[in-house]
Amino acid sequence: MAMQIGIVGKPNVGKSTFFNAATQAHAEMASYPFTTIDANRGVMYARFPCPCKEYGLTCDPQNSECRDGIRYIPIEAIDVAGLVPKAHEGRGLGNKFLDDLRQASCLIHIVDASGSTDEEGKPCKIGSHDPRLDITFLEEEIDYWIKGILSKDWMRMIRKVELEGEKIGGLLEIKLTGLGIKLNDIHQAVKNLGCDTAFSQWTEKEILLLAKEIRKISKPMILALNKCDKVASDIIEEIDGGVAIPTSAEAELALSHAAEKGLIKYKPGDSQFVIVHDENMNEKQIKALEFLQTHVLDSYGSTGVQDCIEKAVFDLLKLIVVYPVEDSTHFTNKDGQVLPDAYLIPQGSTALDLAYKIHTDIGDKFIRAIDARTKQVIGSDHVLKHNDIITVISK
């Protein structure tokens, strides 16, 4: 699982609750800043319809799970220490926070939409803090972090560009090594900036704008508007800033635990649940479930946790699901396992890209591939689609 999604936000907004709900792990939860000091790591799952249901097959997943015809594909999640203002200057646990995010492909920013935590992450009266300020501050902290890396020895780098003919993109990529930032991201950021001023004349302002563009491209972000059951829906609608999803991590965790105990039937992302054994619940538990149905599921369609994961994977990262098989007739591998693997690969990936994803040797010795659905032979440059089933033939 090379891909990693970072769960970020200021202290006490529900990051660890979201992490637990998304991964069913058990990170420590408490109502005070810096509960999370060391990054918690776990596995979340992106859902996608499995072809087994379409073809009436019983699949044998090896690198993922299949439940009732829905494939659950694993993704690594990292829940990092809460961020406070001036974290890029080392305040709070800022340096650790930023260092933990180096390899994150995208970020899920947990925002306390109820406004019940101040800018430091301390509890306050509901509605007394404007959650929109939290969106801005976290983005700016990451921008300043990247800017700090770019600014170091800036003029020495520019001299290499102007006197030695070095490419600015390559030098910036070296500077940002280890942050998971690709050369194409840097080129796109420079292009988006559209600045015609010579690099040697750039001020701190231009460098900060470049850092912001690099952050937007290389660390795209979803806003999880958490504690949505404690705030009026019109306030949720007023919060703007990228992809924003009303979320109740507490509700997801409660429903998941009730499902684990066999009290209800519920799967992550469902819009409702079914009570199985109400005789095993007291009146308080039943009322709590009714509250979650009315104030979360009915109001917003889901708890939002699974929506955040899938928006991140399919919309922000623009990944597709492809199933490699060795037998294009029976959709099996060499051991006869049906649809054993589901791979997440970038949109625009080719058959050759898939071959290399399976194994370097298979990519090196690629001959052709077969679209197992249509039985058509496809070449190395054939662009794959969501839900393709592909057989790769190599020497």
Image (spheres, rainbow, N blue to C red):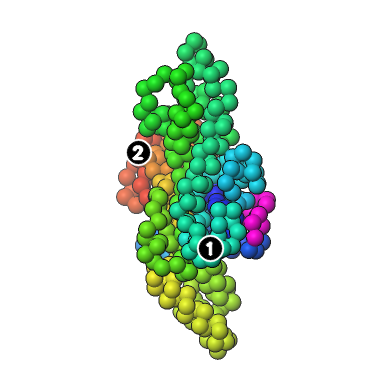
Position above or below: 169 against 27 = above
Of 330 and 62, the residue lying toward us: 62
Of 327 and 232, the residue lying toward us: 232
**Left or right: where 175 falls relative to 236:** right
Of 68 and 98, the residue lying toward us: 98
**Of helix, strand and loop, which mostly describes the magenta segment?**
loop
Q: Is residue 49 magenta?
A: no
Q: Position of residue 293 (x, y in %)?
A: 44, 76
User: Residue at horizontal 54%, vertical 74%?
Assistant: 259
Residue type, label 2: His
- Number of other residues with Cα within 10 Å of mark 1, as a class: few under 14, some 14 to 19, many 20 or more: many
Q: Quadrant of residue 141?
A: top right
Label 2 secondary element? loop
Q: Position of residue 373 (x, y in %)?
A: 34, 52
Q: Count numbered badges in the picture.
A: 2
Q: Which residues are magenta?
A: 32-42
Q: Position of residue 382 (x, y in %)?
A: 35, 38
The reply to whether residue 52 is in sight is no
Q: Residue furthest top?
A: 163
User: Residue at horizontal 67%, vertical 52%?
Assistant: 37
Q: Quadrant of residue 250?
A: bottom right
The reply to whether residue 263 is in sight is yes
Comparing labels 2 and 1, the label whose residue is closer to the camera: 1
Position above or below: 212 against 135 = above
Q: Please give the residue where the numbered disc 1 appears in the rendered image.
A: 116
User: Residue at horizontal 49%, vertical 44%?
Assistant: 139
Q: Position of residue 194 (x, y in %)?
A: 36, 28
Q: Quadrant of residue 311?
A: bottom left
Residue type, label 1: Ser
Q: Please give the residue where the numbered disc 2 appears in the rendered image.
A: 382
Label 1 secondary element? loop
User: Residue at horizontal 60%, vertical 59%?
Assistant: 122
